[in-house]
Image: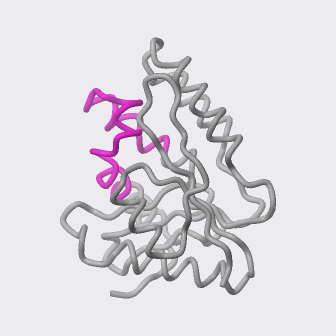
Amino acid sequence: MTTTTIGHTTERERAVAAVNAAFRNDPISRWVYPDDAVYEAAFPRIINAMSGRAFDYGSAYATNDLGGVALWLPPGVKSDGEAMGDVLDETVAPELMDDLKGFAEVQGAMHPHEPHWYLPMIGVLPEHQGKGYGSKLLSYATAIADRDKLPAFLEATTPDSRRLYERHGFEVVGEIQFGSSPAMWPMRREPR
């Protein structure tokens, strides 16, 4: 299994589909979109708004079969906040919006302000989980962060993902939980 940079439009579509499949049972994504049909229609738009700029900056990495995808935002590149807001306003149940906005505010407050690599989305197709895809993708990108002598940052949404990230040198720097939300753990890795 090798790691490659995603470039072509068809690869981008497959990469977004892989991340979408990987997050289908994620506690945070399903808190936001508990209805299957709404999830399937809205979450690919969330992936593109939150991490689509990784494709533009050459920091969207995948295994050679696109069974695993990591969408890293390089230093100084942010998610498309306007597109995120539009998607959420159009697709999230009104009764959840106050909790979601509070959650996002806490998340934003915990995000580093100095230059860093940020991983908003990493996903492995369910049939490839447990086969080292996530580790391969994390090793590839953290080597780039180490080369650049910059920290890396991400948020773990499950205890299993948290343990995976810890094995790659990430440390929990807090907990994000607001209202009815599940917990999420911001994690930081110093360069080596």
Is residue 74 one of those drawn in magenta?
A: no
Magenta-tinted stretch: 17-46
Q: Is 191 located above or below residue 20 in the figure? A: below
Q: Nearer the viewer, residue 42 or 126?
A: 126
> Is 33 contained in the magenta span?
yes
- Taking the image as shown, residue 136 lies to the left or right of residue 108, namely left
Where is residue 1 drawn, in percent x and y? 32, 87
Name the residue rendered at 60%, 62% in the picture: 54
- 13 sits to left or right of 87: left
Q: Tell me which residue sits at (69%, 50%) in the image.
A: 111
Q: How many marks?
A: 0
Structure colour scheme: one colour
Q: Quadrant of the C terminus?
A: bottom right
Query: Residue 137's x, y, as percent?
Result: 44, 76
Q: Is residue 165 above or below residue 48?
A: below
Q: Residue at x 27, y 45 (%)?
A: 25
- Our reading of the magenta stretch's main secondary structure is helix
Quarter of the view holding residue 176: top right
Say which of 170 and 79 sits in front. Answer: 170
Q: Residue at x 39, y 39 (%)?
A: 29
